[in-house]
Amino acid sequence: MSAGTVQAQQSTIREYTRQLHLPTIGGQFLKLAEEAIQQKQGHVAFLEVLLRTELEERERNAIARRIHEAKFPKVKTFAYRHHFGMIIDITSECQQKPRRDAPLR
């Protein structure tokens, strides 16, 4: 096949995958086809890999979409640990030293 024919086939495949809403196949079919040739896979095995790749990507996107739509509260961390340490030190000092206006026991 000539280079022009191959280019036309590739652009046609990309257009078909766009119309069929198969973006993963459209983006990865060349790479997966080259891998299939190197591994000497048949047409059915190549098709299986293509479809599995699309399915896995859709599952990942569905999980990410569900997590986003759930609107879970943001994870809060103790990023200011040193401030908590200062507060604890201040309170421990206050407890150790009696206040001047406090009555002595």
Image (spheres, helix red, strand yellow):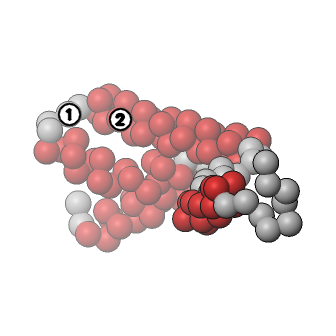
**Quick check: marks 2 and 1 in contact, CB under 8 Å?**
yes
Q: Nearer the viewer, residue 53 or 59?
A: 59
Choose the circle earlier in sequence order: 2 or 1.
1
Does 88 appear above or below 40? below
Report how far apart the C-alphas of labels 2 and 1 lie in the structure: 10 Å
Q: Which mark is residue 89?
A: none
Answer whether residue 19 is visible to the viewer in this image. no
Answer whether residue 74 is visible to the viewer in this image. yes
Q: Residue furthest front?
A: 105
Q: Residue 61, image x and y in percent?
A: 59, 45
Question: Is residue 57 shown left or right of residue 63?
Answer: left
Q: Residue 79, image x and y in percent?
A: 58, 61
Q: Which quadrant of the structure image shows residue 69?
A: top right
Residue at numbered disc 1: 41
Q: Residue furthest bottom?
A: 4
Q: Residue at x 22, y 51 (%)?
A: 34
Q: Residue at x 14, y 36 (%)?
A: 40
Does 29 appear above or below 15? above
Q: Residue at x 31, y 62 (%)?
A: 6
Q: Residue 105, image x and y in percent?
A: 79, 48
Q: Secondary structure at mark 2?
A: helix
Q: Residue at x 48, y 36 (%)?
A: 56
Residue at numbered disc 2: 49
Q: Residue 58, image x and y in percent?
A: 56, 40
Question: Is residue 11 shown left or right of residue 15?
Answer: left
Mark 1 is surrounded, within 10 Å at the Cα level, by few (under 14), some (14 to 19) or many (20 or more) other residues, namely: few
